[in-house]
Image (cartoon, helix red, strand yellow):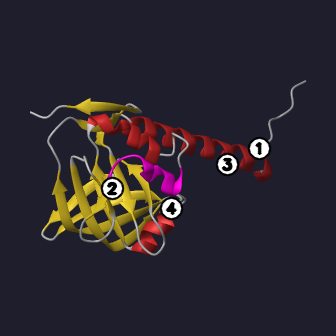
């Protein structure tokens, strides 16, 4: 004898629906990260110094906003150890790395075991207008004063007005593509 099917109670449906929704969100997030890995991005070390202390991090989420006045943006995870210091200091320098500076990218990404001030033991550091650390040997360095912070999802979007620029020696650029450092030669 067969029994008639009964519709599931609301409680029985809620758990699988939530799990399916979470699984779909996780799959979408992974697909997004996989897609973004296909985009070649210049590699930068963002450095700050001031009353909150010196710190820095590796970033690929950097872009120009305008040249009048010269303005750029950097995206930084709010949970990062550098986030509070950079915002408190109100200044930062975007140092665009050359292909032979992949070791510095690893240091400032935290992958070499160096933390905080120890990251600055590699490279030669100076300053320009704001006092933010500028890396000698960078392809270009943009010394910025923080003019706006927007919180979007998990990140701060940091808007900096460029107060000074140093153009380094032309050479191969360091880029990040398919989760690996690569070099790009200019024309």
Judging from the image, what secondary structure is the residue with disc 4 in? loop
Q: How far apart, in angstroms, are the residues tagged by discs 2 and 1?
A: 69 Å
Decide whether residue 139 is among the magenta residues: no
Which numbered mark, 3 or 2, is in the foreground of this view?
2
Closer to the chain start, of discs 4 and 1, is: 1
Decide whether residue 124 is among the magenta residues: yes
Numbered range of the magenta stretch: 115-125
Residue 97, by quadrant, is top left
Hey, which residue is sitting farthest right in the picture? 1
Q: Is residue 39 visible?
A: no
Which numbered mark, 1 or 3, is in the foreground of this view?
3
Residue at image coords 43%, 71%: 87
Q: Are marks 4 and 2 in contact (CB under 8 Å)?
A: no
Closer to the chain start, of discs 1 and 3, is: 1
Q: How far apart, in angstroms, are the residues tagged by discs 3 and 2?
A: 50 Å
Closer to the chain start, of discs 2 and 1, is: 1
Relative to 12, is 30 above or below?
A: above
Q: Which residue is mark 2?
A: 125
Which numbered mark, 4 or 3, is in the foreground of this view?
4
Q: Are marks 2 and 1 in contact (CB under 8 Å)?
A: no
């Amino acid at each position: 004898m067969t029994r008639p099917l009964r519709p599931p109670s609301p409680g029985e449906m809620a758990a699988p629906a939530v799990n399916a929704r979470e699984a779909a969100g996780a799959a979408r997030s992974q697909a997004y990260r996989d897609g973004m890995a296909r985009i070649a991005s210049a590699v930068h070390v963002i450095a700050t110094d001031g009353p909150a202390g010196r710190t820095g991090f590796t970033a690929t989420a950097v872009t120009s906003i305008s040249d009048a006045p010269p303005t750029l943006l950097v995206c930084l995870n709010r949970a990062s150890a550098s986030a509070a210091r950079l915002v408190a200091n109100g200044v930062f320098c975007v140092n665009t790395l050359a292909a032979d500076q992949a070791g510095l990218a690893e240091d400032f990404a935290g992958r070499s075991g160096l933390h905080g001030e120890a990251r600055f033991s590699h490279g030669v550091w100076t300053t320009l207008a704001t006092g933010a650390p500028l890396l000698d040997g960078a392809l270009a360095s943009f010394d910025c004063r923080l003019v706006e912070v927007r919180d979007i999802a998990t990140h701060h979007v940091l808007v900096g007005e460029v107060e000074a620029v140093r153009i380094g020696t032309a050479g191969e650029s360091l880029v990040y593509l398919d989760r690996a450092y690569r070099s790009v030669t200019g024309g």
